Image (cartoon, helix red, strand yellow):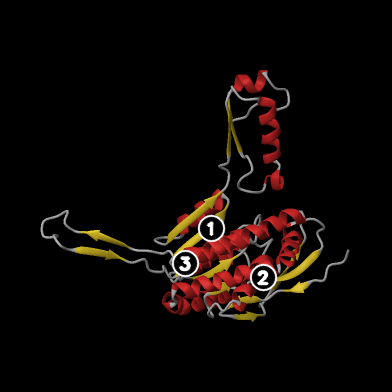
Amino acid sequence: MSIAVQKQKLYINGEWREGKSYTELKSPYSRETIAEIPAASEEEVDEAIAAAYAARQTMAAMPAHERAAILERVGEQLKARQEEAARLIALEAAKPITTAKGEVARTIQTYKFAAEEAKRIHGETLPLDAAPGGEHRIALTVREPIGVIGAITPFNFPMNLVAHKLGPAIASGNTVVLKPASQTPLSAYFIAELFEKAGLPKGALNVVTGSGRTVGDKIVTDPRISMITFTGSPEVGIAIRNKAGLKRVTLELGSNSAVIVDEQVDLDRIIRAACSVRSRSKGRCAFHSSAFTCMRIVMTSSSKNLSPPRNS
């Protein structure tokens, strides 16, 4: 089956821009070219960061109910176009269509949750009478937006993990420069279109694709970006932490999904369940079982269905 190749544009400061250079995006399944994706230059990334930095005061001043309404509209649009969104995920990530539909449904929920939380961002009141002279005094804390957030997302959940970054960031009045995974950028651009139609101010969301060395490093090291949020491998996460300096950094890393097997359980049943989880997404997702901790005697003597235990 032939695929109509689309030429994607960068999304910077509320505008869809032709990239200075492009790379071919191929289907992981058929290896057919499915799109031409802009490979952003450092100058183009700089423009995206500048746009987000300029828009940060507009977003910070936006009332919570308006931020919530934008997120609600994104979820509503996605629900209306969920079949299209699922096919896009299936195309670029080579997921079964049923799995892709499940991701879209979860993404809709994620934006709904973010919209609800936008209206529940509270500060605190603190009595100051713990020290002499503080009697009859109260301090107030108010939560303020951080500013510009650099978001770097992985390929395995290209729509929902983008929502995990954008939902909370927009809900709390921040602006975002998003670098989606090179294999699955179409879902991110699709979501940018929904935010644009939902009325998000120009510059509040910018999507730039390209290499980690050019795009990722610029996002991580630029002083105008106040926080980095990354989902991906431990190796890349550690490198980001080392380069980020004094920025706030949140890292959601893989290789930590342990299966702990006790000697009292039905081992055959556990083996079937563990193999099923282990093979989910061919092992390329954070919640597949990546580490097994078990009693060696039980594993070796009671089952021939598993290979000899390894220290992994």
Residue type for callout 1? Phe
- At x 67% / y 76%, what residue is drawn? 9
Q: Is residue 16 above or below residue 79?
A: below
- Going from N to C along the chain, the mark reached first, 3 or 1, is 3
Q: Is residue 148 visible?
A: yes
Residue 276 occupies quadrant: top right
- At x 66% / y 25%, what residue is drawn? 267
Residue type for callout 3? Ala
Q: Which residue is mark 1?
A: 230
- Going from N to C along the chain, the mark reached first, 2 or 3, is 3
Q: Is residue 302 above or below residue 55?
A: above
* Residue at the farthest left position: 132
Find the distance from the CA under tag 3 to the CA under tag 1.
21 Å
Badge 3 element: helix
Q: Residue 118 bears which disc, if any?
A: 3
Find the distance from the CA under tag 2 to the CA under tag 3.
23 Å
Number of on-image labels? 3
Q: Which residue is mark 2?
A: 190
Q: Residue 238 bears which disc, if any?
A: none
Residue type for callout 2? Phe
Residue toward you, 142 or 232: 142
Find the distance from the CA under tag 2 to the CA under tag 1.
20 Å
Image x and y of residue 166, in percent:
54, 66
- Going from N to C along the chain, the mark reached first, 2 or 1, is 2
Front position among marks 2 and 1: 2
Q: Is residue 262 above or below residue 107?
A: above
Image quadrant in which the C terminus is located: top right
Q: Is residue 207 visible?
A: no
